[in-house]
Image (cartoon, grey):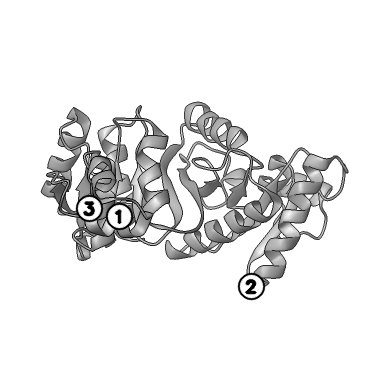
Amino acid sequence: MENFLQKIKTAAKKNPKRIAFPDFAEARVAAAIAQIKSEGIAIPVQTVIDPKKYSARLAEIRGITLQEAEEKLIDPYYFATMMLEAGDVDGVICGPNGTSRERILPALEILKLHRVSGFLFMVLPKTVDADAANGGILLFADCAVNIDPTVEELAEIAIDTADSAKKFGIEPKVAMLSFSTAGSSNDPHALKMREAAKIAKKLRPDLEIEGEMQVDAALIDAIGEMKDPGSHIAGHANVLIFPNLEAGNIGYKLVERLAGAKAVGPILQGLSKPLNEVSRGCSVDDIVNLTAITQLL
């Protein structure tokens, strides 16, 4: 577990970047900033709000008046996002104050390139069955943004998460999760994941993406061979795409709390520049780890 996170930190230290913390006064964030400075992971930047500084640019982006832009920029998340858009910082870590919507909305309005989604690195402990761990690092998506994604959106999420895995040296093997494997059910929910896999493979034939697939078939060699013989992914998946946000959120928290995995993220995809958020229940280490990852995006 620690080897992966340590490698991320080591890479971040080679070229520390300016990271803004809108919640810099919160106790855990303040402690994380001190640790980040001590370890040389990043260059923390506090957000000193000046509503007039970015108002003209925000008004241009959103098609609103200067007054409306200034009112938005009183919000530290809007202000930090505009710092990032302007190039005054290289990344932003939002939270743990506020709700997820409050933290992410400015990024969706200002930095969105295409469908935004969020994945988590699930860093598994050595006590987990090696057959299921598939290298010890799994990516779960979407666990942050899309409540009930369409077939096309699921395909896009799968592609983006596979590309994110590659950024961190992980060769992606993507399973589109369902309660069905390889046509064992023709229920509309299973068909949705099957069709999403087809679309993703058509768009990106260079990626290994299969589905629909049950999670045990995706992770366990013997079960994968039994339920989907001949599959390149079954039993070997390291990128798991959940059918909706409810399943993704439940799934990652079960693995985190019962298997002792370290959940790092969510890490947002589909933005023009790196902005991420920590949950309200985060630890100091969570903030430090996400800061290191944000530097490498």
Amino acid of disc 2: Asp
Q: Estimate the x, y position of residue 135 in percent, counting from the top left.
A: 52, 53
Q: Vertical placement of 182 versus 203: above or below?
A: above
Q: Which quadrant holds residue 178?
A: top right
| Residue hosting label 3 | 55
Asked whether the residues under the numbered discs 3 and 1 touch, taking CB atoms below 8 Å apart as contact, a structural biologist would say yes
Q: For this rendering, which residue is in front, 59 or 170?
A: 59
In this orientation, does residue 158 appear? Answer: yes
Q: Earlier in the sequence, mark 1 or mark 2?
A: 1
Q: Vertical placement of 27 versus 156: above or below?
A: above
**Quarter of the image with the N terminus in it:** top left
Give the distance between the C-alpha atoms of the residues marked 3 and 1, in whole angstroms.
6 Å
On screen, residue 76 versus residue 159, left or right, reads left
On screen, residue 222 versus residue 291, left or right, reads right
Q: For this rendering, which residue is in front, 57 or 2?
A: 57
For mark 1, give the secondary structure.
Answer: helix
| Residue hosting label 2 | 206
Picture residue at 86% right of the left edge, 48% below the top: 183
